[in-house]
Image (cartoon, rainbow, N blue to C red):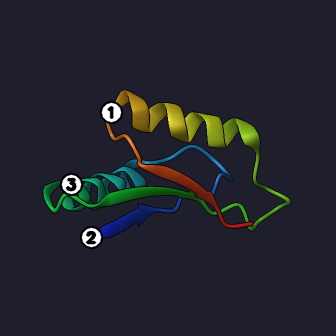
Amino acid sequence: MTVTRFAPSPTGLIHVGNLRTALLNWLIARKAGGTFILRIDDTDTERSRQEFVDAIREDLEWLGLGWDRVEHQS
């Protein structure tokens, strides 16, 4: 089974480079009938903020890039 992931760091808003990575990984997972994981890479505890996690999720949802599960890398 194909498993892909998008692992942004919630230290700011996502940018076009992040979106490209998310889109490609989402497309690969969907084409293969696999799993797309949103992994929040919040290891930078000083700069990571919940408001950025929320914004990342909202942006991906707005773009139609739904995920199968969420993981946190803390």
Residue at point 37%, 56% (across, down) = 36
Rendered image: mark on residue 2: 2
Which of disc 3 and disc 1 is earlier in sequence?
A: 3
Crowding near pointer 3: few (<14 within 10 Å), some, many (20+)? some
Which quadrant would the C terminus be assigned to in this image?
Answer: bottom right
Q: Mark 1 — residue?
A: 63
Which quadrant would the N terminus be assigned to in this image?
Answer: bottom left
Which of disc 3 and disc 2 is earlier in sequence?
A: 2
Name the image quarter holding residue 5: bottom left
- Amino acid on which the number 3 mark rests in the picture: Leu
Q: Is residue 24 left or right of residue 61?
A: left
Report if the CB atoms under discs 2 and 3 are less than 8 Å apart.
Answer: no
Residue at point 42%, 38% (across, down) = 60
CA–CA distance in space, label 2 to label 1: 22 Å
Q: Mark 3 — residue?
A: 27
Looking at the rendered structure, the number of numbered marks drawn on it comes to: 3
CA–CA distance in space, label 2 to label 3: 11 Å
Residue at point 65%, 41% (across, down) = 52
Label 1 residue SS:
loop
Question: Horizontal and vertical percent for residue 53?
Answer: 64, 43
- Amino acid on which the number 1 mark rests in the picture: Leu
Which of discs 1 and 3 lies nearer the camera? The answer is 3
- As drawn, the residue found furthest toward the top would be 62
- As drawn, the residue found furthest toward the front would be 1
Question: Horizontal and vertical percent for residue 72?
Answer: 66, 60
Which of disc 1 and disc 2 is earlier in sequence?
A: 2
- Amino acid on which the number 2 mark rests in the picture: Thr
Which of discs 2 and 1 lies nearer the camera? The answer is 2
Crowding near pointer 2: few (<14 within 10 Å), some, many (20+)? few
Name the image quarter holding residue 34: bottom left
CA–CA distance in space, label 1 to label 3: 12 Å
